[in-house]
Image (cartoon, grey):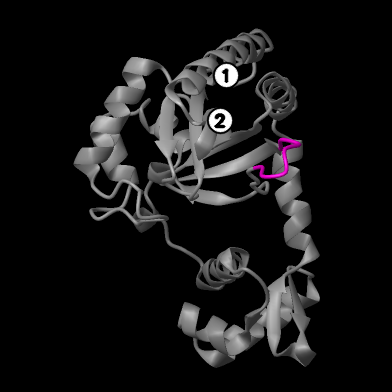
Amino acid sequence: MTTEEIRLVKSAERSLRILEVLGAARGPMSVTELHKRTGYPRSSLHQLLHTMIAMSWIETTNEGAMVGIGSRALLVGTAYLDRDPALPHAIRTLEQIRSSTGYTAHYARLEGANVIYLATRESTAPHRATSRVGRQLPAHATALGKSLLAELTAAEVSFDLPPDPLPPMTAHTVSRHAELMRELESTRQRGYAVEREQNTLGLGCIAVPVSYRIPATDAISCSIPLARFTEEEIQDVSTIIKDHVQQLTIKLRTEGIR
């Protein structure tokens, strides 16, 4: 059933939209700016905000002039991670990959046109890549996303992603569906995805899908400083990730985790 076939409850839809807008912001937002972003009538917006503040979904600063995500949102978001049976196994795999490669390792899940980071184990190197849990990035701009999009048909990819031009994160981000499809075909042939500076300048990334579901929804990656992102290093690190991911996949299937 599509969203168009469901009769949405307006107040619930607006409350969730407010949370999404505030969650995507870098910090507290003025009520005026929130009104501009949502377009909701001021009276309705203020009523919703009062309710959400009273229930700790939203916090206020500057005597109510600024609003941001509250503690209740954190508790509910953490519950998503707590109930995921695959995540503890994936975290152990990330630690093993970080130990073997020395690079930051990530575990993420495909959600429509984006990947959501569920776990990260950072390198101890001074110039390491960082990515917070819960971060969302466009799938077409990440090795994690490309490794999972490569599991889908061309029609499925086109349905999930926005039309051309694809939104850029850097000047190197793939911008056209035709170009992305060529990258996805190379990913299928190699068995892993590669991207250079498509979402973060100065970094390359290698990712492998975790195929305990078909098609795979989760993937693991390593972020590598561009100065070390040589063909030899790509081959070595991709082999390490693939070996660990294969063991993880077997473990998850054996445990009956889907």
Badge 1 crowding class, 10 Å Cα cut-off, few under 14, some 14 to 19, many 20 or more, is: many
Kind of residue at disc 1: Ile
Q: Nearer the viewer, residue 126 or 172?
A: 126
Q: Secondary structure at mark 2?
A: strand
Tell me: 156 left or right of 218.
Answer: left
- For the C terminus, the quadrant is top right
Question: Which mark is first along the chain, 2 or 1?
Answer: 2
Identify the residue shown where x is 44% and y is 45%: 197
Magenta-highlighted residues: 122-128
Tell me: 113 left or right of 68.
Answer: left
Q: Is residue 74 above or below residue 50?
A: above
Q: Are marks 1 and 2 in contact (CB under 8 Å)?
A: yes
The residue wearing badge 2 is 221
Q: Is residue 217 visible in this depiction of the protein?
A: no
The residue wearing badge 1 is 241
Kind of residue at disc 2: Ser
